[in-house]
Amino acid sequence: MHPLNRLHLNNLRAVESVARSGSLRAAAEEMGISPGAVSQQVARAEETVGQKLFDRRPGGMVPAPGTEEFFRLLTSGFRQLSAAAELGRRDRGQELRISCAPIFAARWLIWRLPAFYRSFPDLKVRLDSQVSLADPNDGNTDFAIRIGRGPYPDLRAQSLFAMRIVPVCSPELARTIVSQQDFASVPIIRDTNAMYTWDDWLVPEGAGGLVLRDGPEFSEASLCLDAAMSGAGVFLSFETLCRDALDQGRVAAPIPRFHRTDLRYWLISAGEMSLSPAQRLFRKWLLEATGREGLGHRAVGDPPPPPQPGGVTPVA
């Protein structure tokens, strides 16, 4: 026989409540029954378990010696049961499942979500930051935020803003660079998985074909930005990665001009399904947040927008 078959859940609940609250009366108020009923349930539990679980004292009931692990597991179990019950009760329409690239999630979106929660406290965002692309048509993702050229057949695609790039480095190194030609004399930090090249920035500057030096290489753009902060060289960064660091002076743009690539940020949802009210609220908030911050068009050196209520200042 399974051990749980010998125990009544209400008896275990009474035992756990008494142990946590310290008295029959407090447990009775929590459970909505009389202290006498709680006492009877505790007695039945002790009889079934085959040992005394409490020392009865004038000031209340104290777990008996040797029952520490029993009560620890019991409390943990009831917490998990409560969590399971909450998941079963929760309206899934109030939870948004968002898939986006890890860098966009870590360097931009996660810092703005507190403002979203402040505006919409009943909505929750479950963020899936994977490199692999989620398919909103499979029903497991409300939105995917992608970087690409489009189009996206069979999906609903909302253009957010153009991906722009700018060379960044430490403020100390930036003071040694006064023209595009100076980039040929400093170490260049490279992202081996970048979706754009230096010519995407140099050609609009009239310096296409400039031969650049070698430098540190990383397969993660976030590490490239950190290396640039450390003074290791110059990194051709995209805007959502470096914007907060530029605004806060942790990196500098020696030639402060963004140039657009042929890539864009897109908000993707299922093609055949209309947006839920929660999805419409998130889309509206995201469009307003990116527009307010000037992503895709604000110049380097322009003052950042004022902080929003509930927002958090990025520190990484």
Image (cartoon, rainbow, N blue to C red):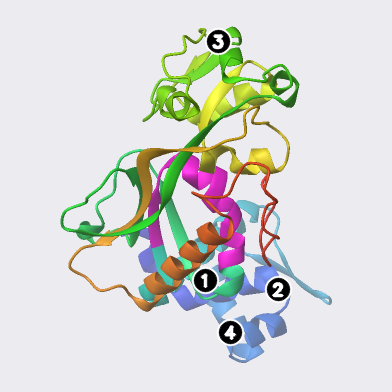
Tell me if mark 1 has few (under 14), some (14-19) or many (20+) residues whose alpha carbon lies within 10 angstroms of its own.
some
Question: What residue is drawn where x is 71% and y is 34%?
Answer: 250
Query: Mark 3 — residue?
Result: 184
Closer mark to the observer between disc 2 and disc 1: 2
Gap in angstroms between the C-alphas marked 4 and 2: 12 Å
In the image, is residue 141 above or below residue 46? above
The quadrant the C terminus occupies is top right
Position in image of residue 88 (x %, y %): 38, 73
Gap in angstroms between the C-alphas marked 2 and 1: 14 Å
Tell me if mark 3 has few (under 14), some (14-19) or many (20+) residues whose alpha carbon lies within 10 angstroms of its own.
few
Amino acid type at mark 4: Met
Query: Mark 1 — residue?
Result: 12
The quadrant the N terminus occupies is bottom left
Residue 210 in sight from this viewpoint:
yes
Residue lying furthest front: 206
Does residue 38 appear left or right of residue 77 in this picture?
right
Query: Mark 2 — residue?
Result: 21
